[in-house]
Image (cartoon, rainbow, N blue to C red):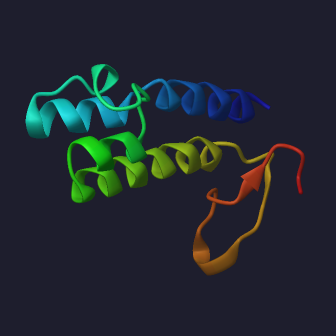
Amino acid sequence: MPLDILGLIVGYLLGCIPTAYIVSRARKGIDIRTVGSGNIGGANVMREIGTGEGVFAGLLDIAKGGRGHTYCPGCKCLRTLDLRGWFCSPSGT
């Protein structure tokens, strides 16, 4: 139970990191919130900054989503290709 709560906290904190904003600031010095659609996401970075940066930002977002579940042992996971925690859901489906 305490590890489940830890998983929720880690997942929440990782989700709070604006990776697309960080990538766009680091590569071009542009505030991604002020250009294009204004969305802080990989697609907007791809359109406004570049394809490589957009793909990188999107992959970081995917990694953030899977990482929180790694710390949630109460979640029933699909353990395909040893990707523990990447295909979890709290409901167990």
For this orientation, the residue located farthest to the left is 28
- Which residue occupies 50% across, 51% down? 62
Compare residues 17 and 46 and report the one nearer the observer.
Answer: 46
In the image, is residue 40 above or below residue 82? above
- Which residue occupies 52% across, 30% down? 15
For this orientation, the residue located farthest to the front is 36
Q: Position of residue 67 (x, y in %)?
A: 53, 47
User: Taking 61 as reference, is 10 left or right?
Assistant: right
- Which residue occupies 10% across, 28% down? 29
- Which residue occupies 58% across, 41% down? 68
Q: Quadrant of residue 72?
A: top right
Q: Position of residue 41 (x, y in %)?
A: 42, 38
User: Taking 70 as reference, is 17 left or right?
Assistant: left
User: Taking 62 as reference, is 42 left or right?
Assistant: left
Compare residues 40 and 34 and report the one nearer the observer.
Answer: 34
In the image, is residue 79 above or below residue 63? below
Q: Quadrant of residue 79?
A: bottom right
Q: Quadrant location of the N terminus?
A: top right
Q: Position of residue 58 (x, y in %)?
A: 41, 50
User: Taking 32 as reference, is 18 left or right?
Assistant: right
For this orientation, the residue located farthest to the bottom is 81
Label total for image = 0
Q: Quadrant location of the C terminus?
A: bottom right
